[in-house]
Image (tube, grey):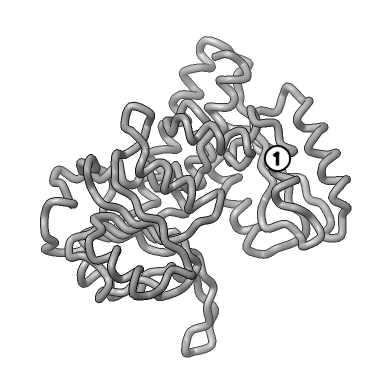
Amino acid sequence: MLLRSKLVTNVFLHRRSVCTIFNGSLLAQDINTEVKTEIIKTRTEDVNFKPKLVAIAVGNNPASQIYLEKKQEAAQFCGISFDKISLAYDSKESELINLINDINSDPSIDGLIVQLPLPDHMSEVLVCNAVLPSKDVDGFTQTNLGRLMQRTDTASLVPCTALAVKKIISSLGTTTFGGSAVVIGRSHNVGLPIQVILGADSSKGGLDMTTTLCHRHTPPAELARVLKTADLVVSAAGIPGILHKNLLKPGCVVVDVGLNRVTDTSGQNKVVGDAHKNVREVASVVTPVPGGVGPCTVACLMHNTLQAARTQRAC
């Protein structure tokens, strides 16, 4: 069963009858359509309003190229101008920083992303923090991550994957207040922001859940203990199969953020999440990989680009 957006029942309070496979592509379409509509509406008042997003890619990582193509497609649909700048793998970090500074000072550009991962000779923290916070549509700068501690609503530039997880959960139509959540993964741009959003006060844009943070080094017995009582599980550990049916509370919601490349028994490469397929025998809702969180993350980048354009142009 594929789920588009709204569920009329509270999935946290009902035992499962059949597992719903969440269709992230359809929710992404809703988000992108909303962005497109808002841009068209704003242009009726300001004909010069056309948000512009620039992506910098260092090297020729095949996966990164695929992600950038998806971002370009979404931008084209929404009416956002998209430029990609490619640098050689062996480019100096100072060259990249200088390019970022030039884009920071260009008033015609509203959003800037630096496609990750970067080559080993470059510092991700240094490079990401070189982006002007008002153009940081990835939400990775220390300034925007710090703002997330104070407010998690969409008035700020929230990290796109974390925002996508929030939109997925909100689209289920369930009451999260007082629910129990487990987040597996502690990266500063995915796991930690998700934990903050889930546990934050609803008056500040949060979901009012009691949240436990685990990671790849959490003892298996402890992970099993907290998962057995979790209404919501968000896994961003990057470990295939870390979630299986014996660990989960019946009727829980599983949001799989994992993106792992593995070789199957036939020797074919494929992309899988963190959750074993057997979780569908226990959970009420599961986001698949691919086709779950990924498309929504790209759509949230469009959302953030519109937000950045409005803020910088005072629209």
Q: Residue 155, how many percent across, how many down? A: 47, 26
- Position of 126 compared to 31: left or right? right
153, above or below 120, in the image:
above
Q: Which residue is mark 1?
A: 129
What element does badge 1 sit on?
A: loop
> Which is nearer the eye, 284 or 208?
208
Question: In the depicted view, which residue is nearer to us: 34 or 313?
Answer: 313
Q: Is residue 54 above or below residue 1?
A: above
Q: Position of residue 238 (x, y in %)?
A: 50, 67
Image quadrant occupied by the N terminus: bottom left
Q: Is residue 139 visible?
A: yes
Outermost residue, top direction? 45
Q: Could you tell me residue 124's position as x and y percent?
A: 71, 51
Q: Is residue 95 above or below residue 248?
A: above
Locate residue 23 relative to residue 291 in the image: left or right: left
Amino acid on which the number 1 mark rests in the picture: Asn
Report the front residue among 125 and 293: 125
Crowd tier of the residue under label 1, counting other residues whose Cα lies within 10 Å: few below 14, some 14–19, many 20 or above: some
Left or right position of 263 against 251? right
Residue for point 42% across, 30% down: 153
